[in-house]
Amino acid sequence: MSLNTGSEPPILQIDKLRIGQGTKAPIVEQMSLEVRRGETVGLVGESGCGKSLTALSVMGLLAGNLKVVGGTIRLGGEEIQGLSQRKLRRLRGEKMGMIFQEPLTALNPVMTIGAQIAEMVRAHRDVSRKAAHERALELLRLVKIPDPEERLGEYPHQMSGGMRQRVVIAMAIACNPALLIADEPTTALDVTVQAQILELLASLQREENLGLLMITHDLDVVRLVADRIVVMYAGSVVEEGAVEAVLDNPRHPYTLGLISARPTGSFAAGAPRLADIRGSVPAPEDRPAGCVFRDRCPYAQEVCATTRPMLETGQGGHAVRCHFPVDRQTDAPKELAQ
Amino acid sequence: MSAVLKLTDLQVHHDTARGALRAVDGISLEIARGETLGLVGESGCGKSTLARCVTGIDKPNGGSVEIEGVTAGRGKAARLQRARNVQMIFQDPSGALNPRLQVERIITEPLSVAGEESRSAHRTRAIETARKVGLSDYHLERMPHELSGGQRQRVSIARALVLNPNLLVCDEAVSALDVSVQAQVLNLLLDIQKELGLSYLFISHDLAVVRYISHRIAVMYLGRIVEIGAAEDVWASRLHPYTQALIHSIPEEAAKTGRTVTLEGDVPSPVNPPSGCAFRTRCPFARAACAEARPELRAVGSHEVACHFAEEIAAGSGAEPERAHG
């Protein structure tokens, strides 16, 4: 957990972020999130909930007609919206780095690994080619790539998926950023390689005292690496808090649904049917009025259709956006299946 | 009862510039009626190639594929016969469905290919099959892009069911789906198995999913089966060091043990696999003997494993040596 915060502002502070697409319904709204130095925050939710868009807006990388139309994004206390492209480019890389899901598309196929990392270093630091090359070598060691001298001269296609992801991580931390955003960094990898990359990220986060925002759909990954968890549904936060508090005692029916939907045990050996969540995530323009989860929620009542619940913070910073928060002690998770 | 599927010493080799790649290197297995065999292993281990041989998309270089006791042959009649018995569901339902066809046409296309029944009978079969997978008449008139990911996967399943096959090959069939939708599709697969007595060859990299849905589990490494047995047996008394590493790498398991990394490095190239035991280069228990002789699958305890030192590993109560890593 973050103990070293003191009066230092969070390295990342998103407040009431709203991301719109032309004249259509906003895709992300009322999105607030904080990441402090030395802390790993797991941002979870299903596809289409807006978690990747939130990350891209922090990086200033929203594409097409997607735009931040409301709210604030502060990096180390400084508002980043309205900054010139030039200033933003400096921030990317120097104060924050990003790791993407598919390392192959994040790397240039016709440049050697060494040249790509050195380019990144020289874009941000006024150093000689030789110094940049040495920094590249040092970074490959830092991300524990075996035989780093040889690897510098290789092209991405010569490496395995796990090694490529290590290179992407090396580039993201090349200029000692304070914030690292990892968007599904292990989803495309095999389970044994996923374990290696997760361990690498956790150790870098500790050693470099990074703020790490880990975006994933996998609650077990969050339990393994994160201090705090933020659960998004249909464009906003529905629950957040310390990882154990939220995963062991989920208050929002959606969080409970996500936990219960994961298979455990063997059906043939007597494990129960899976508790699925009925329906699917609505498109932004089809989100219901009131609580956006209500038409998939087994606990929905009349008020849920008319009044949008606020994100209410309870004990220990455990916050939930629900009129009728679940209490696992009294409600059986089975009910969700009905 | 006879096996729905029987593979005997199946071999699939691809010629590459660097030599023969043994994608599947001598696999024998059976799937009984109403049974689910889960197939796990890392990418490049040959599990998809195996699936493609079972459905007839790829041709094996050696060994045989028997379906319902009949050796799968070549020629149109044999292909159609196989299609009636074996159908496949793919990972990405968007890529597997023709975007220009209405759902009804997609579901009934196998009937046309098989030359079955009249057009009017097709509609009845489409409605019938759609209901089995939880789709309504409304969905039959939609185009694939109008459906959600979960609904599209239901369409894939309906298309696979329309010829009343005995065996469904599910290649990462739920991997691209969100967890809430994945649960819906897994429940559906369990329901239709019970209703229709189907057998599944269920391939996935997600071990928790495979454990949940399978009666038996086979673990593949570099084209060979290294461990096979009843799902809970393999899970609880895993003997092969590779199976142990796979299970320990799952974040859920790692969160329990507090140890994440259990296996260094990547799967070696199948073009030039290590001598003896193919896993020895990553194995924490490897010794000189492992480089010399290739371990064959043999019964140890309750199931089968291909490891020279399975008994020792079992006697060590599954405990692995502590590995130093940075």
Image (cartoon, rainbow, N blue to C red):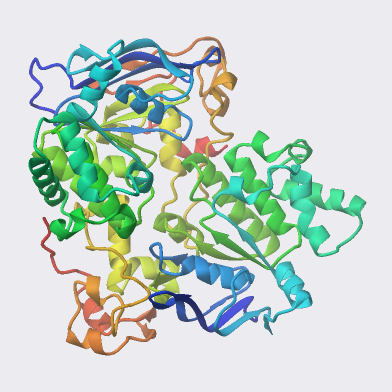
Q: Is residue B37 left or right of residue B76?
A: left
- Closest to the observer, B262 or B275: B275
Instruction: Answer yes or no: is residue A46 visible.
Output: yes
Q: Give the total number of marks visible in the rendering.
A: 0
Please give the name of the residue rendered at 10% of the width and 62% of the height, measured from the top-left corner. B324
Report the quarter where the N terminus of chain B lies: bottom right
Query: Residue A51, image x and y in percent?
Result: 39, 29
Q: Is residue A124 left or right of residue A109?
A: left
Residue A13 in which image quadrant: top left
Instruction: Answer yes or no: is residue B255 visible.
Output: no
Q: Is residue B154 left or right of residue B107?
A: left
Q: Would you place residue A194 above or below residue A235 in this image?
A: below
Residue B141 in which image quadrant: top right
Please give the name of the residue rendered at 81% of the width and 65% of the height, measured from the top-left corner. B114
- Closest to the observer, A206 or B252: A206
Q: Is residue B214 left or right of residue A37?
A: right
